[in-house]
Amino acid sequence: MEDDRHIDAVDRRIVRELQRDASLSHAALAEKVGASAASVWRRVRALEKAGVLRGTVRLADPEALGRPVNVLCHVRMTHQTTDARAEFEAFIQSREEIVECYAMSGEWDYLLRISVRDVADYDRFVMRGVLAHPSVANAASHFALRQVKFTTEIPV
C-alpha cells in the first residue's frame, strides 16, 4: 500500500479472509470482518488500487489434473550477465511446467518448482529444456515425497 495509507485491523481481516476464500460476496465478507458491505466494498477497492490485493484465482488440484509430482530444481548459470539472465527468465516464463521460480542468493542462481506427471516426464523436461538452455551450467533436482504444508496465504 502507499506509505501514507495505514492498513487497519479491518483491512487486515479483509485480506486474511479473501486469502482463504476469494469467492466471498461483499455481504458475506462484511459479516466475517464486522463491517458494512458498502464499507468492505470500498476497502477492497482501495486495497486493490494500492496493490495489496492482486488477481483473484481458483486453486487447482495437481493430482486431479495429472501432475502429482513436484520437483524442486536448483539451477546454476554459466554467465551472470543481464542478457543471459533475461534469456533464461524468458524461457522460464514460457514453460507451463515451471509453476514457481525464484532468483536466489548463494550457491545456486535459481530455484524452480516444477509440476510434472511422473519421473519420465521430468527427465524429458529437464534434459531437453533446462539443461539444454545455453545459459545453464548445471542443475540439481529434489523430488518432493509428499506435501507437508502448502498455503498461498501471506501472514497479515
Image (cartoon, grey):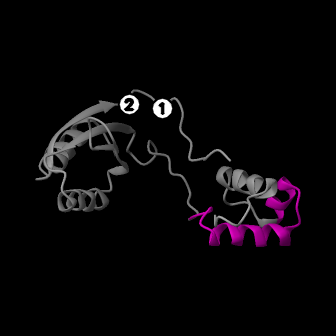
Q: Which residue is mark 2?
A: 144
The residue at the point 56 percent across, 42 percent down is 151
| Residue 127 locus on image (x, y percent) | 14, 43
Q: Quadrant of residue 138?
A: top left
Left or right, 38 with respect to 135, comes to: right
Which amino acid, by three-letter code, is at mark 1?
Gln
Judged from the image, the secondary structure of the residue bearing numbered disc 1 is loop
Q: Which residue is mark 1?
A: 147
The foreground one among 34 and 61 is 34
Left or right, 45 with respect to 62, comes to: right
Viewport quadrant of the N terminus: bottom right
The Cα–Cα distance between marks 2 and 1, rounded to whole angstroms, is: 7 Å
The foreground one among 49 and 30 is 49
| Residue contact between numbered discs 2 and 1, judged by CB atoms under 8 Å | yes
Left or right, 13 with respect to 88, comes to: right
Q: Quadrant of residue 45?
A: bottom right
Question: Is residue 116 at least partly visible in the picture?
Answer: no
